[in-house]
Amino acid sequence: MKHNARDNILYVQMFGSFSMTWNGRPVTGGSKSGETQFNYLMQLLLHNRKEGVSREHLEQALFSDRDIADIHHAARSVIYNAKKKLTAAGLPPARYIENQGGVYHWTEEIPVREDAAEMDEISREAAQEQEAERALALYLDACHCYTGEFLGNQTAVWAAQEARRYRALFCTCVEKAAGLLRLSHNYPRMEELGLYAAKVSPLADWETITMEALILMGRYTDARKLYDDTVDLYLQELGLRPSKRLMELLDKMGSQMGHHYAVLDDIQAKLSENSAESGGYLCSYPVFQGIYQMMARVMERGGQSVYLMLCTVVDSKGNPMKEGPMLEDLSQRLGNAIVQSVRRGDAINRYGRGQYLVLLVNLTREDCSVLQRRINYNFLVGRQRTGVRYYVSSVICTAEKRDNLMNKRKG
């Protein structure tokens, strides 16, 4: 939302953190926190300029968590003090807050530009626009109005409801804009849109738009790196697996990737691992999944024993640790302990916060127990009260179950 230093308009930011600006100067409530009655009052009035705010709604928003004998008097005091603060902030003299039959309104004497209201207006215009290029420009403008969660630090019910509405509106605008960019083959702009959406609305799977654009531009290395980074981010922050859409794009990338003509020696040199480090092979989830599926096929021919082991960090009571300030450090230490304990031919994946998967080849069940003791030795320090819980499953069992199920279906 662009504005000049002095244009006699009150600029209001609702997305992300709340702020008000008049002639280039911030208008604040005089508190280090955004959770002030002054800001609550201004947020309500400025966001509901057309319909106004009823006295009951205003009093509920201001004093819902307080026991006040005369709530009407308290509300009038907040409004009176707000007018004094607005004047002190440099706004021209006016009846800033008007009471019309028990409904409070922001005065029409002071013009307001609010980012949330602009997003509403631009998105409505975009939805009605018939010309594709103009509609695209409008949808992109609406997307860029959204710079974060609506009143991100507000906990009031009305603010939470509006936050959900604007989140859904942002989603619609991004998808509409991406669709138009896809049709016009404007993949660089599509990449920019995906990056912006992921920045202002993180952990919402917007990386799929960026990845699709990268694939369509043939930038497979960048697409693969984005995929791996996204999987790691979602695992560490939410403990979630890659979305179905992201997996589909990865498969699409694999089918579209082309290479220049080369002899076998050159191809093999590129495929070979450069690292000569000892210990297990720590890899991303897609790589681990591919290794697992390949080993399951090998097991169908017999001749090898393969086990899948899940290692989970647990607290002093033996319960899985899912959060807490120590979890990240413990996860890193567990990963290092596993890498040191297994062989170079064993694959390892950090499955989530405090969890690792290990694919063990040519071991017996007894060997798995020995390995667990080795991991504990490398992981446990001093009188450490946390520990590791292990689950082990034979890959051949999984393969046999699948074959039995397929035979039943055929029968």
Image: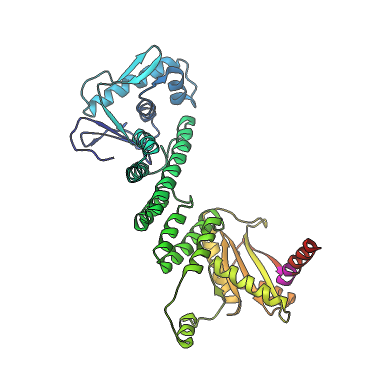
Rendered view: 330 above or below 97: below
At 41% from the left and 50% from the top, the residue drawn is: 178
At 48% from the left and 24% from the top, the residue drawn is: 66
At 46% from the left and 86% from the top, the residue drawn is: 263
Magenta span includes 221: no
Rendered view: 8 above or below 340: above
- Residues rendered magenta in the picture: 393-399
Q: Residue furthest front?
A: 130
Q: Position of residue 345 (x, y in %)?
A: 60, 79
Residue 117 lies in what quarter of the image?
top left
Q: Nearer the viewer, residue 16 or 316?
A: 16
Residue 243 lies in what quarter of the image?
bottom right
Q: Quadrant of the N terminus?
A: top left
Rendered view: 254 above or below 168: below
Residue 170 lies in what quarter of the image?
top left
Q: Residue furthest right?
A: 411
Magenta span includes 397: yes
Scheme of colours in the image: rainbow
From the image, give the main secondary structure of the stretch colored magenta. helix
Left or right, 165 with reference to 22? right
Q: Does any portion of residue 326 appear in the rendered image?
A: no
Q: Quadrant of the C terminus?
A: bottom right
Left or right, 285 with reference to 197? right
Q: Position of residue 378 (x, y in %)?
A: 59, 72
Q: Position of residue 239 (x, y in %)?
A: 56, 56
Left or right, 228 with reference to 145? right
Q: Position of residue 381 (x, y in %)?
A: 58, 68
